[in-house]
Structures are given as structure tokens and as C-alpha cells.
Image: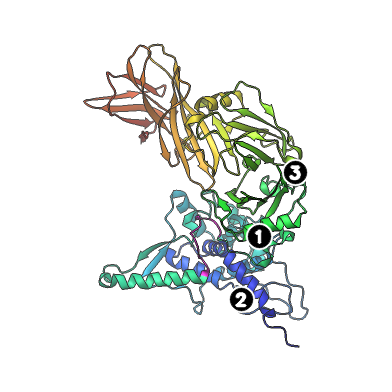
């Protein structure tokens, strides 16, 4: 009997959907596994060719494997299968992983593991243009050099561990299926690669490329025609890859609407209630499904359908991909909150909160690579200035307190089944005294006993940290890098006092901020016995990797800090731990002073004004100059190693 038309094509349709949905991940895996010493243009095109060739031309019959791996794609080191006794095909996917995607990934690896390119492989071509991944910093270059020193199996192992997040055992299994020689040794070699910016950096994303013309001088008379051909080639390639719609943030897997089963609640991932007690990955993936409607198929189906096909009621925080889930979502909660059906999901990269009814819809926020602190709570429901949180299963006690009232007692917050009572939220943006959430973890979680979180209007509260001055120690003679501020939890009384005084100077208090850090980098005794001033550096780090910093000084008799400078960048982070700042100050006697201060490694401060200058050694890292009137000045700090830094103002 002849099969019905289209029946044999359904597996191919699944493979096509998986390829489009995970194309960016597959290309990134190929790019990392390919030889890192070839030119970047060829490497980009070869990575796209490997991903595009992963789609089989036909579907294999008589096997349970979702894709037939072509024998020509396997390297020579692959062990041949016995034809005498057909065994069951190997399992290509880890538990909970899409088997179709795992088969595509295996084909990509087999292509990338080839020692030499096959001539019959047709790579994408772009005439008149060269494609490059964006240039990164020193850390990107160091990672590229480390990858170039590895052999092909080790590079493939690094891609599986870094991009896919596979365990060492799972990576060994995938490499063995791909025919890599010595998979155990390859995984061990990949583990020796020093930690850097990570493969999600734009420098390792062949889908976020820069374009440069070739033979520009020779072709200048026909530049318009050449660019038109190049643009046409890029447009055609984009159409083939299905990359339609707005560009997504660099470093994120592209997502396309998944096949029809995406709205099936049976595909949701659920973990055991005690999973967090038996894993080293204590984050959203260890949250169990909670809520009295976690078996409500209709509610779960509406939430999944809303995410599978984003529409006008989809709201994504800045830097968040608004597309469909990139993996089968974890169910974190499904229940009725204040009379409204609410579902919370996590796809490994983003938190999605679906709400029924008028004014509901889908809210998305980045939450990739969380930790026990940043995965401690999610905003479950927001009504006006009041919020209800869904707390992590490892949270034993919770309370709230006004951040501008550090001496006031905290208010215990009941949280049956992880859902808290309504609590005040927001307040950081306009400095009206935010109510912060303090969580105490179970004794079974020894990493942190307490954390402080602040609601900034998004789905995931920001984690507050504190670095007192004595944490910035002078480096020992054996140290080659300056010490970085070592943040601690902001739950102690000294931290609460500091946040109460300087919290209003945070540079960013909007949704999408992952962590707010406060560092008191200097204390200065003021002239004329006027007391002391404390210099702070405040930093806001976002989930997408961006960040900004601000310096501020708190002067006697002042209830709010005075901002002295700041802006986007890495200042006050572990990458740039040296900082300096200055401000004008009028003493109680009416004398005008210029105040300047620096962190522990600042040895000299230089000030230049109209027709005057001062250059002083500052053993106490601070300087006060009496001036008759304020004027435009330039301040420069010299570190103990001779490096000069200029504070922004």
C-alpha cells in the first residue's frame, strides 16, 4: 500500500523546524570546532556550510533515530558498525533534550571534525565582500589562541561544554557518536582552556558578522554594482536561513516558531521537589513545578501558545529576545494569583510569565547563567506598587525592609508554597526609599546564608552587594594584577547603612539589571575639622553583559550623595578596579575646597586649573585644595605602578 502523500515528509519537516529554531547554536558550535588558525572569512562561511548541510536530503527508514547520519560525513577514525546483526541505534540526545536537534548537532560535529574540507561541499558565497566576526578584546583573543592550540576533538568538546552546557560525560558520549578520536582526552583538554568572556561573545558568533568590501581600490569605479550584488547575496542567504524579523541580541540562539507540538503541556520539563538538594546547578533549572493549577492543561496550553507565537501582548525587557522558547521550557509555577491565572516558565535563557485576562499577556526577561542569589525570586504578580514574589525552593525565611531605614526592624514575609504576600516594590528609580527583599537560604545550601534583592520593575529582582574599603587590599609583590573589589552580601548592618546613605546614586535602576554593587573606595578627613567624607562607586550590571558605574561622595550634613561622575563601561568591576573622583565642597566656614580621592592603588593626585596646578603624593589616597572660587579643572590620578587614570566628570 502506498503511503499517504506527505506522510514520509513529516520527519523532514521536524528537522527543518529544528534547524531553523537552533540555527544560531549549530553555527556557533561549528565555528568553535573548526580550525581557529584559518582566516575568519573562511571560518564563518565553513561554519554556515556545516550547519546548512546538517539537514538530510532524505529520511532513513527502519530506524528509530530521528536523522540518518551519512557515512560520508564520519571521520576515518569512526568505528564501523557491524552489518551482521543490526543493533538498536544509539541514543543521540540526553534526557530532556530534543532528539531531532541532537541528531542535527551530531551531523554538524562530524562535518567540523573533518581534518580537510571536502571539495564537493559548496559553502555560501558572497561576492565582493568579506565577512568577519566582530573584533573582541584581549580576553577574546586569548580564548581564540587557546582554541587554536587544541586539536579538532578538543575544540568540539569545548563547544559542547560551553555552548550546549553538557556535562563531561555527556560530551564524551556525543564525541564518541561523532567518531572523534579520544573523546575522554578531548574533554579533558577542553577543560584546561582558561575562563574568558565565553563563546557567547560576539567575537565567536558567526551570525553577528561585520562586512568589508574586497579589492576596494581596483573596483572603485564599479563599487555600486559590487555592493548591490553583495547585498543581494546577503539577502538571499538570510531568506534561506529564515532570519526574518528584527535582529536579536548577539550571543543568543535564534528562535523560530516551533512545530505544532510546542503548545503541548506534555513537553514541559518538571523536576522533583528536592532536585535542588542533589545538584550543583542551584538555579531556575532546580525549581520544582508549584501552584494548584500545574496540571491545568488549558492554562498551560494558553501560556505555551502565547510564547510559541509572540504577539501584541508580548512584552520583552530591554536586551531580551522576544522569540519562542529555545528549548522545552521548565514549568516553575501555574496557579491563580489575586484571581488571575499565572504561569511561570524558564527555557534556560529567559523567564516567561503568562497572565490570563485583560491586561495580561506574556512578559519575558533574560535570566541566563543565574546563581542561587539571582535565581532566588521572580515577580509573580504586580498590582500598582505592590508585588508578590515566587521564591526559590531553597528559601527558608524571607522579610522586607526599607532600604533608607537600616535601623528599623524587618517585616517577616509569609510565603506558603513559595508565593509571598503582597509587599511594596520599586522605589529605586526616584529614590523614595525602596523596600528590599531579604532571603535566608536553607542550611542545606551552604553557599549563601542570606541575600538582598531589589525590585526594579522587571521579572527578576536585582541582587545587591557591598564592598567595604578594607576589601580592596594592596597587592602583594607576587601579584601581577591589581586587586578587585570583593563584593559580599549586603545583609550586614554596615552594608545596610551604606546602601541607605548612597543607594540613590545608582547609575541604572531599570528592568534588566542583574546586580547592583556598592563599593566605599575611600574615606577622607575634611579640613577645618569638618568631619569626614565617604567616596563610593556604584555599579549596575545587566543580564546582557552591559554595565555602567557612577562615583559619588557623601559629605557631612548631607542626607543624599553627590554624584561626581560615571558612565557605561567596566569601571569599578573586577576588570577595572582602580577608580578616582573629585568634587567641589564649601566648608561650614564658607571656604571653597576641591576634594579628590582614589582607591587603594592611587599614589598621586594631579590637579590643573586656570593658571595653577598641584601635584601631590597622597598616602591616604585623598586630597583637599583650598581655592578662592570654582573653575574648570582637570584631575588625574597616578597608580603605584605608574599608570594614570582620569576620573570622569
Asked whether 17 or 525 is in front, the reply is 17
Give neighbour class at mark 1: few <14, some 14-19, many 20+ (Cα, 10 Å): some
The percent coordinates of residue 516 (x first, y second) are 53, 36
- Indicate left or right for 372 with 497 as reference: right
Magenta stretch: helix, strand or loop mostly: loop
Q: Are marks 3 and 1 in contact (CB under 8 Å)?
A: no
Q: Residue furthest bottom?
A: 1
Give neighbour class at mark 2: few <14, some 14-19, many 20+ (Cα, 10 Å): some
Q: In which quarter of the image is residue 433?
A: top right
Q: Residue at x 54, y 71 (%)?
A: 52
Question: In the rendered image, which residue does mark 2 sit on?
Answer: 56
- Indicate left or right for 248 with 368 as reference: left
Q: Can residue 552 be seen in this snapshot?
A: yes
Residue 1 magenta-highlighted: no
Q: Residue furthest front?
A: 358
Which mark is first along the chain, 2 or 3?
A: 2
Which mark is first along the chain, 1 or 2?
A: 2
Residue 251 magenta-highlighted: yes
> Which numbered circle lies on residue 277?
3
Q: Are marks 2 and 1 in contact (CB under 8 Å)?
A: no
Residue span colored magenta: 241-253
Q: Nearer the viewer, mark 2 or mark 1?
A: 1
- 10 vs 500: above or below: below
Q: How is the image coloured?
A: rainbow
Q: How far apart are marks 3 and 2 (CA)?
A: 42 Å
The percent coordinates of residue 469 (x first, y second) are 50, 26
Question: In the rendered image, which residue does mark 1 sit on?
Answer: 305
Image quadrant in which the C terminus is located = top left
The percent coordinates of residue 291 (x first, y second) are 75, 46
Amino acid at each position: 500500500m502506498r503511503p499517504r502523500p506527505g506522510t514520509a515528509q513529516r520527519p523532514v519537516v521536524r528537522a527543518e523546524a529544528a534547524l531553523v529554531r537552533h540555527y544560531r547554536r549549530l553555527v556557533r558550535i561549528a565555528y568553535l570546532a573548526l580550525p581557529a588558525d584559518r582566516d575568519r572569512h573562511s571560518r564563518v562561511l565553513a561554519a554556515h556550510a556545516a550547519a546548512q548541510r546538517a539537514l538530510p536530503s532524505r529520511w532513513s527508514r527502519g530506524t528509530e533515530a530521528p536523522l540518518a547520519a551519512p557515512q560520508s560525513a564520519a571521520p576515518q577514525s569512526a568505528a564501523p558498525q557491524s552489518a551482521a546483526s543490526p543493533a538498536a541505534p544509539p541514543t543521540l540526545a540526553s534526557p530532556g533534550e530534543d532528539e531531532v536537534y541532537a541528531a542535527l548537532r551530531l551531523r554538524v560535529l562530524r562535518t567540523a571534525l573533518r581534518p580537510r574540507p571536502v571539495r564537493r561541499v559548496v559553502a555560501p558565497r558572497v561576492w565582493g565582500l568579506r565577512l568577519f566576526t566582530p573584533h573582541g578584546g584581549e580576553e577574546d583573543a586569548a580564548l581564540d589562541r587557546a582554541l587554536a592550540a587544541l586539536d579538532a576533538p578538543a575544540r568540539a568538546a569545548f563547544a559542547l561544554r560551553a555552548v550546549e552546557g553538557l556535562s563531561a560525560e555527556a560530551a564524551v558520549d556525543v564525541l564518541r557518536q561523532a567518531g572523534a578520536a579520544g573523546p575522554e582526552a578531548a574533554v579533558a583538554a577542553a577543560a584546561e582552556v582558561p575562563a574568558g568572556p565565553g563563546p557567547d561573545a560576539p567575537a565567536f558568533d558567526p551570525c553577528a558578522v561585520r562586512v568589508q568590501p574586497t579589492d576596494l581600490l581596483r573596483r572603485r569605479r564599479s563599487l555600486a554594482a559590487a555592493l548591490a550584488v553583495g547585498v543581494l547575496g546577503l539577502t538571499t542567504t538570510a531568506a534561506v536561513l529564515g532570519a526574518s524579523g528584527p535582529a536579536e541580541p548577539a550571543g543568543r540562539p535564534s528562535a523560530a516558531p516551533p512545530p505544532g507540538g510546542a503548545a503541548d503541556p506534555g513537553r514541559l520539563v518538571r523536576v522533583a521537589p528536592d532536585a535542588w538538594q542533589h545538584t550543583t546547578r542551584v538555579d531556575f533549572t532546580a525549581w520544582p513545578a508549584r501552584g494548584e493549577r500545574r496540571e491545568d492543561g488549558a492554562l498551560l496550553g494558553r501560556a505555551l501558545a502565547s510564547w510559541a507565537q509572540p504577539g501584541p501582548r508580548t512584552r520583552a525587557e530591554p536586551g531580551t529576545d522576544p522569540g519562542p522558547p529555545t528549548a522545552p521550557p521548565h514549568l516553575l509555577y501555574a496557579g491563580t494569583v489575586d484571581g488571575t491565572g499565572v504561569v511561570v516558565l524558564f527555557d534556560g535563557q529567559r523567564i516567561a510569565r503568562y497572565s490570563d485576562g485583560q491586561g495580561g499577556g506574556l512578559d519575558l526577561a533574560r535570566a541566563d547563567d543565574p546563581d542561587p542569589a539571582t535565581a532566588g525570586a521572580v515577580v509573580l504578580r504586580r498590582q500598582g506598587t505592590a508585588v508578590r514574589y515566587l521564591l526559590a525552593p531553597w528559601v527558608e525565611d524571607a522579610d522586607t525592609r526599607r532600604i533608607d531605614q537600616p535601623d528599623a526592624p524587618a517585616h517577616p514575609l509569609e510565603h506558603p508554597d513559595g508565593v509571598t504576600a503582597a509587599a511594596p516594590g520599586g522605589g529605586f528609580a526616584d529614590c523614595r526609599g525602596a523596600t528590599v527583599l531579604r532571603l535566608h537560604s536553607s542550611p542545606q545550601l551552604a553557599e549563601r546564608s542570606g541575600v538582598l534583592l531589589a525590585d526594579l520593575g522587571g521579572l527578576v529582582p536585582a541582587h545587591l552587594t557591598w564592598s567595604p574599603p578594607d576589601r580592596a587590599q594592596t597587592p602583594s609583590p607576587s601579584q601581577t594584577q591589581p586587586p578587585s573589589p570583593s563584593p559580599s552580601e549586603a545583609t550586614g548592618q554596615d552594608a545596610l547603612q551604606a546602601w541607605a546613605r548612597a543607594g540613590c546614586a545608582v547609575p541604572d535602576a531599570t528592568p534588566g539589571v542583574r546586580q547592583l554593587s556598592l563599593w566605599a573606595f575611600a574615606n577622607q578627613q575634611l579640613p577645618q575639622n569638618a568631619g569626614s567624607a565617604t567616596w563610593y562607586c556604584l555599579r549596575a550590571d545587566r543580564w546582557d553583559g552591559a554595565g555602567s558605574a557612577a562615583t559619588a561622595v557623601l559629605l557631612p550634613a548631607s542626607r543624599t550623595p553627590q554624584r561626581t561622575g560615571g558612565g557605561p563601561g567596566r569601571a569599578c568591576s573586577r576588570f577595572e578596579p582602580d577608580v578616582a573622583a573629585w568634587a567641589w565642597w564649601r566648608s561650614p566656614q564658607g571656604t571653597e575646597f576641591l576634594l579628590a580621592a582614589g582607591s587603594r592603588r592611587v599614589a598621586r593626585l594631579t590637579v590643573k586649573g586656570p593658571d595653577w596646578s598641584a601635584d601631590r603624593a597622597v598616602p591616604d589616597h585623598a586630597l583637599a585644595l583650598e581655592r578662592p572660587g570654582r573653575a574648570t579643572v582637570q584631575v588625574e590620578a597616578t597608580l603605584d605602578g605608574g599608570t594614570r587614570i582620569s576620573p570622569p566628570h
